[in-house]
Structures are given as structure tokens and as C-alpha cells.
Image (cartoon, rainbow, N blue to C red):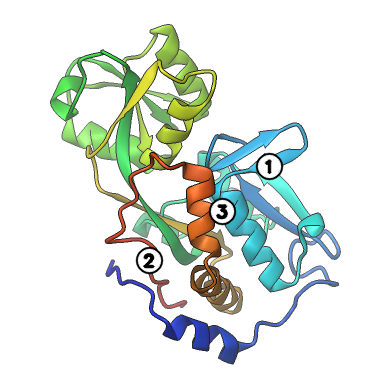
Amino acid sequence: MQIRKMGGVAIVAVAALGLSACGGDDSGSGSGGKIDIGIKFDQPGIGLKQGDKYSGLDVDVAKYVAKELGYSEDKINWKAAPSKQREQLIKSGQVKMVVASYSITDARKKEVSFAGPYFIAQQALLVKKGSGITNLQGLQGKKLCSVSGSTSATKLKAKVPGVNLQEFDTYSKCTEALVAGRIDAETTDDTILSGYANQDTYKGKLEVVPGVGGDEIYGIGIKKGDKATCEKINSALAKMVADGSWKKAVTDNLGADYKLDAAKNPPKQDTCS
């Protein structure tokens, strides 16, 4: 995928397209005037549910896009979108879109379409402080946790055949097992792992090992072939970057310590097809 920086032309493009509001009908979700959006519920900094509150980069991106589509925040029905259920949620019509650290891959594009991308993360490891695991070679013979349906596990298993891969339902379960000593490391995107390392429960106990894999290119999953919605979302994302909301969302949610790859972020959206 070719990655290009967004230019000022994005503002002009947004104005020219003149996004039309979709609220007031059931085109968003089948819920009647509301829109159903899938996010993660257990990823601090990305998508987190605490009581009836939702926070994270994906949440802020989803709220911005929904508003541009004509849905105010009180018109959003948030639904949990575990990694292995994301395609089915979209295909069955249970959600209009999935904004859930959802990496764009060729395999997934056979089942759903993607708007975006809106962020490019890097694959990393989460380990206990002082574990001695500082790179991929340190994983030989170790227990590595990831989530079923994630691209991260597949990538690292290919690079480190000797690793003992264990797949859980959620990354929060991986993190609990890591702290308890039942596994040696956890792998997924650096955004997600930074969120756990900075969570009050784990602060000071864990550390992120960067640079163990390639790019994780986050897109917004929608029904396959829905070009019209894809184009509206892409225009919303371009506007979010142009007016500074994207940068604020990244800083607010990932924290000052997060090492943003500014050479690749913010990414330019792909052409919808």
C-alpha cells in the first residue's frame, strides 16, 4: 500500500463533496434514526467501555465520522466488536461500520470493504519489566499470547517458529495472564499495548518492545461494495485531519509517550471501490 501524507487539498475536496446527512432514517443500522458502530470494549486508549462511558482513539474517530454522516453522539449505538467477530458483524448488518483497531488486509477485503486508512500503528510486544525479552529472538521457546482472528499472531509465528503461541478471546485476558506469569509476552499493535502499559492497574509493571513487525494499517470496515458510504467516510476522515481533530484525538488517547510514526501518519485514504 502506498502511503502518502495528506495535503491541504483535502479541505477543498471535503467542501466540494458537501457531505449529506443520513440521520432521520434507518440507513445507518436498521435501528431507526440511529447508527450501530462496532468498537473494542477492552482496549484502553483505543476503545474502552467503563460503565456507560466510551473512550479511545477509535471512539473519537467513530464519533467524528458519525457526526459527518448526520448522527450526533446520542444517536450512536456502540456494540462490542471482538477481533474474530468483526467481519460477521458487518456482513450480517448488525453494525454499519467497525472502528476497532481493524487492520486492512487482503484476506479481509475479500469479505468486507474498508474506508480509510485513518492510522498506521506498528506491531510490538508487551512484556514484564526486566523480563530480558528485548527482540524477536528472545521469544524462542517462550509463551506468546495474542487474540484469535488477529493478524499479529500469524506474523510472529512465521518469524519465530519456536514460540509457543496461545490465543485468547481478548487482549485484556492476555495482559492478565502476562502479569500473573502464565505467559511470557503479548503481541499486537503498539497503540493497544501502550494503553495497557499506561493503565493504572499495570503502570510500572510492564513495558513495550517496539519494532518486531510491520505496519498495522487501521481502516473502517463497512459492507462489501458500499462505495457511497466509503466515500463519505473518507471525506470525513480528511476533514478530521484538516481541522486538527485527528491530531488532538491521537494525543488525547495515546498519550505524550506514544512514539507516533510521523512519516506515515496521518495516512491518505485509499480510493473506494
The residue pinned by badge 3 equals: 99
With 157 as the anchor, is 168 left or right in this view?
A: right
Q: What residue appears at the point 72 percent right and 55 percent down from the top-left corner?
A: 36
Q: Marks 1 and 3: CB-CB under 8 Å?
A: no
Tell me: residue 242, above or below residue 162: below
What is the spatial separation of the Cα atoms under label 1 and label 2, in whole angstroms?
Answer: 25 Å
Local crowd size for mark 2, using a 10 Å CA cut-off: few (<14), some (14–19), many (≥20): many
Amino acid carrying label 1: it is Tyr
Residue 92 position by quadrant: bottom right
Amino acid carrying label 2: it is Pro
The residue pinned by badge 2 equals: 267
Q: Position of residue 6 (x, y in %)?
A: 38, 74
Tell me: residue 60, above or below residue 222: above
Q: Position of residue 69 (x, y in %)?
A: 69, 72
With 72 as the anchor, is 236 left or right in this view?
A: left
Q: Marks 2 and 3: CB-CB under 8 Å?
A: no
Q: Marks 1 and 2: CB-CB under 8 Å?
A: no
Q: What residue appears at the point 74 percent right and 66 percent down from the top-left corner?
A: 28
Nearest the camera: 73 or 224? 73
The residue pinned by badge 1 equals: 54
With 102 as the anchor, is 129 left or right in this view?
A: left
Amino acid carrying label 3: it is Val
Q: Position of residue 72 (x, y in %)?
A: 77, 63
Q: Position of residue 185 (x, y in %)?
A: 32, 21
Q: Which mark sits nearer the N-terminus, 2 or 3?
A: 3
What is the spatial separation of the Cα atoms under label 2 and label 3, in whole angstroms?
Answer: 16 Å
